[in-house]
Each structure stands twice: as C-alpha cells, then as structure tokens.
C-alpha cells in the first residue's frame, strides 16, 4: 500500500465533511501536514459526536435511542480512524489510539446502525470527552503530563535490547533531554513483570552512581530515565588517547563505589559491561551511573531468572558450564576486574599486559581458582591503589 496515497485519500474524505482545527495544538508533533490535520479533525468529530451521545446517557435498564444521522456520521469517522490505524501501523507515521477511546470505538461498532438510528446499550455511562489530551498518540512521541495538561514530544530511538527499545526526547519545559525505556509488545506477562521490577529496583536505590528513573506508565509499559551523554564504551573510545592514569583511576573508583552500594543492598547486577555503565560529562569531571538492571539477582524473588542464557563478553566464561543460576559475587568481581582493565587501557584483550602491576591485578581478578580472586569490591579497590 502506498502510505502517502492512503493519507491523501482520507484527507479528501474528511475534506468533504469539513476540517476543524480546534484540537490542532494537540497534534503539533505529527511530522506530516495532512495527517496532522486529519487526526485533529477526527478528534473534533469524536468529541462532537460523543457529546451528542452523552445527551442520551447514562442509559437505564432498557437502553436509549441514538439518532440516525449522528449514528451514520460516527460509523464513518470510526471507519476512517481504524483504516488509518491499520494502514499506518508499520510505517513511520504509526500512531496509537488512547486505550479508553479504543475500547469505546470497539463498543460503538457493536451497536451502531446505519439506518433508523441506534440502540444505546443498557447502563452505558457518559463518555469522557478529551479536550486537553490527544486521542491519537504517535508511536514516535511521548505525552508528558503535569497537573493541568500534557505536552507531546517527538522521540528518537537510540538503542534496542532483547526486551525493550530506548528513545530520547527533549522536554522543552525543563529544557533538558530524557530517555524512555519502552517494553516491546511481544513480551510475556512474566517478562513484563520483570521489566517493571527493573524500574522498581532502580527507584528504590538512592545513590549518585545509579541512573535516576522518574515515572512508570502501566498503559505503555515504559518508564522515563535521566539522559546520559555516553556509555563507558563510547566515552573510552572517544577519549582513550588523552586520559591520564589518575583520571582513569577516578572513573574506575566511581564504578566500584556504585557496585559496593549495589552489593550492600543484597543485589548482584549480572550484566556488567561497558554499555551498561553510563557517563554524564560535566565541565570538571565525568560522573558514572549504572543502568540496565534487567538481569539483577534479587534474593528470594520469583522473578530472578535462573535459566538466563550466558550473556556478555565481560562475564566469567565458567558460567557457560556452571549455569547462569550459579552466578555469585565472585562472578561479579570477575566482570568488574575486566571493567577496570578496560578503563585503565581501553582494551578488552588481557593476553599481553606489559605493566607488571596491572598484570598482577588482572591475574588475581580473573583467576580460574575462584578462592584466589578478589572476594568483594573492597579488595578490588585495594588492588587498584597498587597499579
């Protein structure tokens, strides 16, 4: 299907009915002039027709009659809306229909009649009319609500994981960037519970070294996080040739303080990598924050995955044999040793280390005999001082 032609066809269909721009400000973020006008006009007709329907609501035990002309008009508006929704859902102009209105539209399709009017269902309640919030939400946008109204912002995808997509947007009220982590639509109920649990875990933490999260939406299965400038990987890649040893140690010590705090809460991250450690660059210092707690090991939690596949170059390869369910603090110190080495050198290959003190540090942290490894984060911190 030619998307542009389909939008044009619906535009001309509505043109015959008459456009209305009363709600155009709610759709300013729609990056297509005619689609923007179509959605604003559909919003107007839904509001107008449902306001007319409200004159007959709430109904009693026997229902009520809804006149023929608005019945036919509402049928037409619903057909245009659902046609657009289905035609655009795999395109860059994909949009979602507010859950309340989507259920309402489905309900209306069951009782609306194109002739002689319609019988409104018994005990049907009055309809909430949306005057300051959109009925249609672009899949590439987010609505940020405050006490009185809501703002719509374009979002840009900046990452993707197994369970979620990550987007960035700029909030013009605060004049700063934020990040949305949105669960993929094909997740199972248990996966969705685990996704929300990740948010709840991060919300419970209170540390300058843990990424801040702000709000969870059950409607969209997404949450908002603070925006960081770099991953550890991208920061080291950009700055590796000009970072001094004291600067590298400073970054490594921040990472270790973060994990000392995480471990003090009885948690193991289990997915330590340069892409899950983020950096905010200030004028005087880079500040690290830990993200992606999707695999966090929580004592006595039924949501802690015990059969998770081995992930990550920085994880202890013995987990392939032992199983990920055996993950413990000595596997975490193994991964942290690799992280420290990466920070100190910008390299991941530990086969040839010329610096004697650094080599001794790495050999201890990655020792195949787990009893000879760093037993906790404090021991790793002591080891760094000797480098």
Image (cartoon, rainbow, N blue to C red):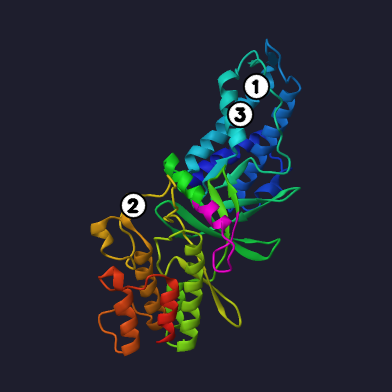
Asked whether the viewer can see residue 92, the reply is no
The reply to whether residue 35 is in sight is yes
> Mark 2, mark 1: which one is toward the viewer?
2
- Indicate the position of residue 202 as horizontal and vertical percent values: 54, 57
How far separated are the C-alphas under marks 3 and 1? 14 Å
* Residue stretch in magenta: 198-214
As displayed, is residue 40 above or below residue 80? Answer: below
Percent coordinates x, y for residue 387 in the rendering: 40, 87
Residue in the image at 40% along x and 87% along y: 386
Rendered position, 73 above or below 172: above
| Tag in front: 3 or 2 | 2
Disc 3 and disc 2: Cα gap in Å?
A: 40 Å
The residue tagged 2 is 308
Q: Secondary structure at mark 1?
A: helix
Q: Which circle's residue, 3 or 1, is located before the other in the chain? A: 1
Q: Quadrant of residue 204?
A: bottom right
Q: Which mark is residue 71?
A: 1
Q: Tell me the residue that label 3 is attached to.
A: 104
Element assignment for label 2: loop
Q: Residue at x 38, y 80 (%)?
A: 346
View extreme (top): residue: 62
Residue furthest left in the image? 321
Residue at x-position 38% and y-position 66%: 332
């Amino acid at each position: 299907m030619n998307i542009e032609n389909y939008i044009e066809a619906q535009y001309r269909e509505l043109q015959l009915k008459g456009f209305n721009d009363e709600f155009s400000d709610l759709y300013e973020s729609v990056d297509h002039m005619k689609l923007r006008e179509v959605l604003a006009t559909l919003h107007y007709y839904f509001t107008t027709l449902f306001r007319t329907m409200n004159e007959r609501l709430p109904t009693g035990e026997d229902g009520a009659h809804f006149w023929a002309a608005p019945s036919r008009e509402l049928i037409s508006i619903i057909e245009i809306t659902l046609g657009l929704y289905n035609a655009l859902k795999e395109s860059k102009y994909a949009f979602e229909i507010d859950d309340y209105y989507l259920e309402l539209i489905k309900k209306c399709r069951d009782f609306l009649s194109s002739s002689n009017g319609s019988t409104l269902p018994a005990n049907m309640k009055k309809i909430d009319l949306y005057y300051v919030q959109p009925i249609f939400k672009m899949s590439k946008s987010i609505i940020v609500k405050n006490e009185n109204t809501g703002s719509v912002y374009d979002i840009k995808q900046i990452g993707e994981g197994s369970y979620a997509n990550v987007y960035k947007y700029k909030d013009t009220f605060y004049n700063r960037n934020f990040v949305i982590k949105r669960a993929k639509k094909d997740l199972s109920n248990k996966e969705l519970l685990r996704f929300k649990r990740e948010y709840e875990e991060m919300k419970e933490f209170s540390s300058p070294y843990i990424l801040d999260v702000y709000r969870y939406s059950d409607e969209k299965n997404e949450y908002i996080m603070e925006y960081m400038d770099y991953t550890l990987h991208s920061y080291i890649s950009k700055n590796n040739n000009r970072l001094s040893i004291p600067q590298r140690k400073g970054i490594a010590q921040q990472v270790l303080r973060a994990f000392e705090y995480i471990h003090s809460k009885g948690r193991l991250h289990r997915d330590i990598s340069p892409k899950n450690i983020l950096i905010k660059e200030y004028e005087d210092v880079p500040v690290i924050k830990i993200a992606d707690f999707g695999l966090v090991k929580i004592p006595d939690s039924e949501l802690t995955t015990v059969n998770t596949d081995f992930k990550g170059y920085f994880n202890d390869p013995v987990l392939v044999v032992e199983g990920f369910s055996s993950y413990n603090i000595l596997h975490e110190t193994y991964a942290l040793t690799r992280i420290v080495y990466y920070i100190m050198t910008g390299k991941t290959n530990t086969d040839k280390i010329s610096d004697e003190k650094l080599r001794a540090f790495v050999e201890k942290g990655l020792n195949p005999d787990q009893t000879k490894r760093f037993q906790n984060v404090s021991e790793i911190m002591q080891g760094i001082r000797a480098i």
